[in-house]
């Protein structure tokens, strides 16, 4: 992956790419006037509220509030990092990334292609080995576990036989990549021969969301530690980013209403065999931030379904804590508590699909599981213990972005601990979310001017040179003057302006301003803007005059400031 791209290249990329063309290949869009409308890919909806503006090269959803440029869309739709999305766009639109000191993208891309090719060929070898004489015991083991031939082939399950490496591999380059880059081959210090880290294990190929095999999981046939083994981290495999079964889940469902998160490969495969085709498995002991983001990009509901033992409940509590920052309006997490000593694989085989799905539908809501676990972990017999408990509960609740959900949880907390009007005592107003801020974001002259400039950058030519006084108390005036001077005489667009402030606090404000509908006909925008600039100039003069008059009353004015006051009054009189 590239490590750096210049601002010049990003602006060039934004100029040469077309957001409508890109999104049309992902979702259906219908043109209405200047805009294109479609079903939002980031939340479930029946009526299209997702708008793409070809002129501004931006998208916005009136349902869930997501918005951004072509880079943002690729980032969230494909679950890529910023630099990965730049790489992806450069490939889609055939815009070469210039060489830089940090890396050469073309070389890296070629290298990664080699890794994917080698790992795919290895997967074919594992699959064929399962159905050979060496894999006979493993194949019988899978049948004994209840897997049919169709599901074995569907998930490309394989087997790694003993001592295959030196007998089959004679390509030095391939051996080197498998050893040094992918970590699948190791060297036996006794005889200096290579061996497969997955030898004598059932092999489960791990696919990324695009369907490319990026790594393997291996399971022993007998009780031996480690029971499960994953590929080591490398250029194409990061276990904290991948979810086993996610590609298959996307493949089987046009709309994914919910996703069941389980602990192991076997659980996913068993559920799919019983026609529950919306299960994925984490590849570690707990879910990661990247995995949660990836899942919430394709569904609104996550159900944690771990083993029915103490370790499983502990893992669910960890998952709850990891999920807190992602509980925005419309996103939901639930918890499926299995009977003790049961896992999804064993339970669905005992109960069948109908009863298992009843359990899914009866999963505990976030609030029920949250308070149940909190009160199990915290028993208080004194005022001090009760106070500590309250602070512990609130420390979790405050991490939730959804303002109204927070209010309801705090209210429930008060009821459970027996404090009347706890919501009023605590006053969670300080945790208002973006929606509340957006609704209370007042339309001042400066903000309206900024909003119009961002939406119609060509208006910048009508902004004269404005003087900034240190005594000015017009909020945002300094930023406005600085903004205008920076972008004056530059070929700027709405999308470039927003991109310039990526990763800053200002970008959130600008994103609100760019969505403001001023209800002004296009042919009147220019005149309205010019009149607003005149109003601002008058405000600046009036503000300075008020300051000078106030200063005169307090300590008197010297000759220079008296001349300034007289001059400003004269200018103001002419303007009015």
Image: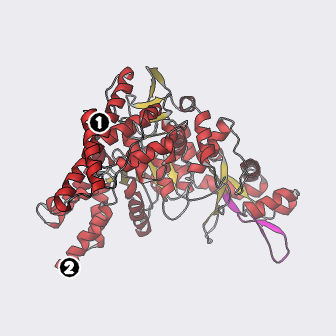
Q: CA distance from mark 2 to mark 1?
A: 59 Å
> Circle 1 is placed at which residue position?
535
Q: Is residue 489 above or below residue 550?
A: above
Quadrant housing residue 234: bottom right
User: For the residue labelled by badge 1, is the local secondary structure a helix, a strand or a loop?
Assistant: helix
In the current view of this chain or complex, which residue is farthest to the front? 559
Q: Residues within 10 Å of mark 2 (few under 14, many from 20)?
A: few
- Is 382 rendered above or below residue 307? below
Foreground pick, 103 / 419:
103
Q: Estimate the x, y position of residue 550 in percent, counting from the top left.
A: 19, 55
Residue drawn where x is 34% and y is 31% of the image: 517
Per the image, the residue denoted by label 2 is 384
Which of the two discs, 2 and 1, sits closer to the camera? 1
Q: Position of residue 220 (x, y in %)?
A: 64, 64
Q: Start and end of the magenta stretch? A: 185-202
Residue 324: % across, % down: 37, 58
The kind of secondary structure element at disc 2 is helix
Question: Quarter-wise, where is residue 186 in the image?
Answer: bottom right
Q: Earlier in the sequence, mark 2 or mark 1?
A: 2
Q: Is residue 212 left or right of residue 81?
A: right
Task: Residue 490: name its quadrant.
Answer: top right
Q: Magenta stretch containing residue 383, yes or no?
A: no
Q: Residue at x 39, y 22 (%)?
A: 522
Seen as rendered, the residue at the extreme left is 420
Q: Look at the numbered discs 2 and 1 and tell me whether their residues touch, using CB distance below 8 Å.
A: no
Question: Is 302 drawn above or below residue 555 in the view shown?
Answer: above
- Judging depth in this view, the residue of 31 and 43 nearest the camera is 31
Is 193 magenta? The answer is yes
Residue 275 shows in the view = no
Q: Quadrant of the C terminus?
A: top left
Front-most of residues 234 and 399: 399
């Amino acid at each position: 992956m590239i490590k750096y791209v210049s601002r010049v290249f990003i602006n060039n990329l934004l100029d040469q790419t077309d957001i409508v063309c890109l999104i049309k290949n992902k979702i259906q869009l219908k043109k209405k006037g200047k805009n294109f409308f479609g079903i939002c890919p980031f939340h479930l909806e029946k009526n299209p509220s997702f708008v793409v503006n070809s002129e501004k090269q931006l998208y916005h959803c009136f349902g869930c509030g997501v918005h951004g440029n072509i880079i943002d869309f690729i980032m969230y739709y494909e679950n890529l990092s910023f630099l990965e999305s730049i790489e992806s766009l450069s490939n889609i639109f055939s815009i070469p990334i210039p060489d830089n000191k940090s890396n050469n993208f073309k070389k890296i891309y070629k290298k990664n292609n080699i890794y994917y090719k080698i790992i795919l060929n290895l997967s074919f070898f594992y699959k064929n080995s399962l159905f050979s004489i060496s894999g006979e015991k493993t194949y019988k083991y899978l049948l004994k576990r209840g897997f049919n031939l169709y599901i074995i082939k569907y998930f490309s399950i394989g087997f790694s036989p003993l001592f295959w490496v030196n007998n089959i591999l004679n390509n030095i380059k391939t051996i080197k990549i498998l050893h040094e880059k992918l970590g699948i081959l190791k060297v036996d210090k006794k005889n200096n021969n290579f061996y497969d880290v997955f030898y004598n294990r059932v092999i489960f190929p791990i696919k990324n969301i695009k369907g490319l095999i990026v790594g393997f999981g291996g399971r022993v046939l007998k009780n031996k530690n480690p029971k499960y083994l994953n590929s080591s981290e490398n250029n194409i495999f990061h276990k904290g980013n991948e979810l086993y079964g996610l590609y298959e889940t996307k493949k089987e469902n046009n709309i994914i209403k919910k996703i069941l998160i389980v602990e192991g490969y076997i659980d996913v495969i068993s559920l799919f065999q019983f026609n529950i085709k919306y299960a994925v498995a984490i590849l570690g002991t707990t879910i990661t931030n990247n995995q949660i983001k990836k899942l919430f990009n394709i569904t609104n509901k996550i159900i944690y379904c771990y083993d029915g033992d103490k370790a499983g409940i502990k893992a669910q509590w960890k998952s709850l804590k990891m999920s807190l920052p992602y509980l925005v309006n419309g996103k939901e997490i639930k918890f499926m508590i299995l009977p003790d000593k049961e896992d999804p694989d064993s339970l669905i085989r005992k109960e069948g699909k109908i009863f298992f799905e009843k359990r899914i539908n009866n999963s505990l809501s976030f609030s029920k599981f949250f308070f149940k676990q909190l009160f199990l972990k915290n028993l208080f017999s004194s005022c001090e213990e009760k106070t500590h408990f309250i602070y512990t509960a609130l420390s979790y609740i405050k991490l939730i972005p959804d303002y109204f959900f927070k209010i309801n949880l705090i209210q429930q907390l008060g009821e459970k601990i027996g404090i009347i009007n706890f919501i009023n005592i605590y006053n969670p107003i300080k945790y208002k979310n973006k929606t509340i801020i957006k609704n209370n974001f007042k339309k001042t002259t400066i903000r309206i001017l900024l909003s119009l400039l961002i939406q119609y950058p060509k208006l910048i030519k009508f902004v004269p040179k404005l003087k900034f006084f240190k005594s000015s108390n017009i909020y945002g005036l300094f930023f406005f003057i600085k903004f205008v001077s920076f972008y004056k005489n530059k070929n700027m667009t709405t999308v470039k302006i927003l991109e310039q402030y990526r990763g800053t606090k200002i970008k959130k404000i600008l994103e609100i301003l760019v969505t403001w509908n001023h209800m002004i006909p296009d042919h009147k925008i220019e005149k309205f803007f010019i009149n607003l600039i005149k109003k601002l100039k008058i405000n600046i003069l009036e503000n300075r005059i008020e300051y000078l008059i106030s200063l005169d009353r307090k300590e008197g004015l010297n000759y220079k400031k008296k001349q300034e006051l007289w001059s400003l009054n004269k200018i103001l009189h002419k303007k009015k």
